Image: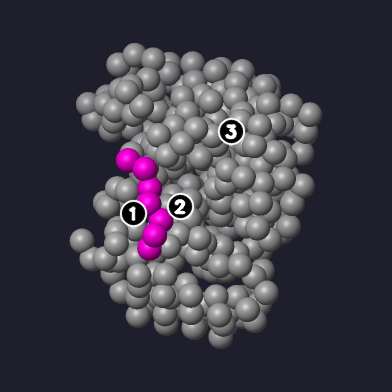
């Protein structure tokens, strides 16, 4: 597995990382996650060369971090653990974000809640240091903590030896600029895939400019780009893939175009390269200018074993063919 440094840190992270959102469980994923299988998935990822594991307190209200901690109990020194702060549900500090699993969740990047969050995450992860600590979502009004105050609090955690590097997630271009001005930022995590290319306009160029590593998420569009989703696939109520604003390509009027494109690649590009559609989609993502690391979600060992083999080189002809097909795909309806 190819590795690259995480921004300005000394940590060498696998270019394919394990995204542990689904491992946290909850109604967003349609069913309860089996913890034992989740642990086997993490172990399979590491055996396949994946050393970067990305989780967050909000993934199952701490459950995701707890599972990651249990999985790494006997191999912590081999893993780069990334988690987050900024989604808060203990009380009403912060700005209301959403109602999730029956609980009100707030965006809070206040120094006081960050201090409480980092201690909780350290305990759940069973570690004395978090390798990459990221702000999950930027603060917003009415309780909008100044970025300088947030980065100041995180810098103090670095100096105290509780975290090794600072990252941001889901920030605008202006917010990214300000975060970088206020402190040492190593990474930027954001949604990016061949079906969601908005970051190419400003965010990716800024990451290149500042020397930030990228952690792209939903690069497989929650399974759509693996080819395993068909027109017969039905998702349970509450599943993120049923939300049209979030995943318009899952709508029945849009899905056939994506599936036809994937079927064409399966019979040509995948066959020639000896790779799966999931590997092809992640390899395409890694081939884009400015992309350094890609998060691959998984709930079962075989899923991550497959995607971990995605650090393959795509030639110019293959990339040109894929780009032409993506342009022909157009925009989703609805």
Q: Residue at x 67, y 22 (%)?
A: 126
As drawn, 334 above or below 55: below
Q: Which element type, helix, strand or loop, lies under badge 1?
A: loop
Residue 96 horizontal side relative to residue 171, left or right? left
State how far apart marks 3 and 2 are (Cα).
19 Å
3 or 2: tag closer to the N-terminus = 3
Q: Which element type, helix, strand or loop, lies under badge 3?
A: loop
As drawn, 96 above or below 293: above
The residue tagged 3 is 34
Q: Are marks 1 and 3 in contact (CB under 8 Å)?
A: no
Q: Are marks 2 and 1 in contact (CB under 8 Å)?
A: yes
Extent of the magenta region: 231-237
Query: Residue 6 location, x and y as percent?
Result: 62, 48
Residue 247 is tagged as 1
2 or 1: tag closer to the N-terminus = 2
State how far apart marks 1 and 3 are (Cα).
25 Å
User: Which residue appears farthest toward the front when viewing the image?
Assistant: 232
Task: Judge whether residue 13 is colored magenta.
Answer: no
Q: Residue at x 64, y 70 (%)?
A: 275
């Amino acid at each position: 597995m190819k590795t690259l440094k995480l921004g300005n840190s000394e940590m060498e992270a696998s270019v394919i990382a394990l995204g542990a959102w689904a491992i946290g469980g909850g109604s967003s994923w349609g069913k309860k996650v089996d913890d034992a299988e989740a642990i086997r998935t993490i172990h399979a990822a590491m055996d396949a060369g994946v050393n970067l594991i990305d989780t967050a307190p909000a993934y199952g209200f701490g459950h995701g971090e707890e599972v990651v901690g249990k999985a790494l109990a006997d191999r912590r020194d081999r893993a780069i653990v990334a988690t987050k702060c900024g989604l808060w549900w203990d009380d009403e500090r912060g700005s209301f974000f959403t109602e999730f699993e029956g609980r009100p969740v707030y965006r809070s990047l206040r120094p006081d809640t960050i201090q409480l969050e980092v201690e909780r995450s350290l305990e759940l992860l069973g570690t004395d240091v978090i390798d990459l600590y990221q702000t999950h979502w930027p603060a917003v009004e009415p309780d909008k903590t100044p970025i300088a105050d947030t980065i100041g609090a995180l810098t103090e955690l670095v100096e105290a030896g509780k975290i090794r590097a600072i990252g941001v997630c889901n920030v605008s271009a202006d917010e990214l600029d300000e975060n970088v001005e206020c402190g040492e930022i190593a990474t930027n995590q954001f949604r990016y895939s061949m079906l969601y290319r908005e970051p190419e306009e400003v965010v990716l160029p800024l990451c290149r400019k500042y020397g930030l590593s990228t952690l792209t998420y939903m690069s497989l569009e929650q399974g759509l780009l693996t080819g395993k989703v068909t027109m017969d696939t039905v998702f349970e109520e509450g599943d993120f893939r049923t939300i049209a604003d979030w995943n318009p390509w899952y709508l029945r009027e849009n899905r056939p175009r994506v599936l036809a494109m994937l079927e064409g690649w399966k019979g040509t590009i995948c066959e020639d390269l000896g790779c799966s559609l999931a590997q092809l989609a992640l390899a395409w993502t890694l081939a884009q200018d400015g992309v350094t690391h890609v998060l691959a979600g998984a709930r079962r060992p075989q899923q991550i074993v497959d995607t971990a083999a995605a650090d393959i080189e795509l030639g110019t002809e293959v990339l040109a063919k894929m780009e032409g097909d993506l342009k022909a795909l157009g925009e989703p309806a609805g």
